[in-house]
Amino acid sequence: MENRRSMALDSTACEMCILQKRETAAHLFLRCNFAKACWRSVGIAYPSTRSVLSIFLNIRRQLHLPFSMEIIILMSWSIWTSRNDWTFNNVAPAIRDVTRKFISEFRQVALHRARPLLQPQMLEWVAAL
């Protein structure tokens, strides 16, 4: 039994990857095989052995879009909610579900929160996925 943020947990090992690595933020969102596959589903690949900052900078350079932070945030959110569904609701994680959620959330941001000037480019980018 391990303690984490005042919670008693059976384990802090990642339940979504075969390596059973410790669940750190870097692992959950960037280094877990499940997370890497989710990023690849939207055309983003990166060397996961680098620092977190280096990985995010690599993603931003790779995308070379004025809304790259929105992509990073929404993919992280989609991965997080999928992991939570697995942990709390016993919903098996699937990359296609994460991708579907990401696309849905991204379209909502593009249509309702983005600057009007960026909306066409954002919608074009997501339609190409």
Image: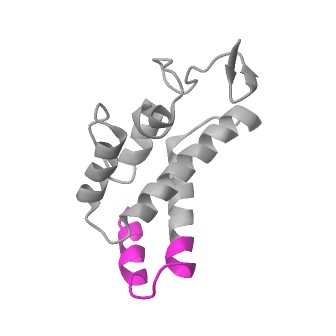
State the residue at coordinates (39%, 38%).
36
Taking the image as shown, residue 88 lies to the left or right of residue 127, namely: right
Residue 128: % across, % down: 35, 66
Residue 112, image quadrant: bottom right
Residue 93: % across, % down: 59, 37
Outermost residue toward the front in this view: 6
Viewer-side residue, 17 vs 27: 27
State yes or no: residue 112 in magenta.
Answer: yes
Taking the image as shown, residue 118 lies to the left or right of residue 50, namely: right
State the residue at coordinates (41%, 62%).
69
Quadrant of the image for the N terminus?
Answer: top right
Residue 85: % across, % down: 68, 40
State the residue at coordinates (75%, 26%).
7
State the residue at coordinates (55%, 40%).
94
Question: Considering only vertical position in the picture, is 111 above or below 52?
Answer: below
Q: Magenta region, mostly helix, strand or loop?
A: helix
Taking the image as shown, residue 71 lies to the left or right of residue 54, namely: right
Outermost residue toward the bottom in this view: 116
Question: Considering only vertical position in the picture, is 6 above or below 122?
Answer: above
Residue 2, image quadrant: top right
**The magenta segment:** 108-129
Question: Considering only vertical position in the picture, is 71 above or below 28?
Answer: below
Question: Considering only vertical position in the picture, is 102 above or below 106?
Answer: above
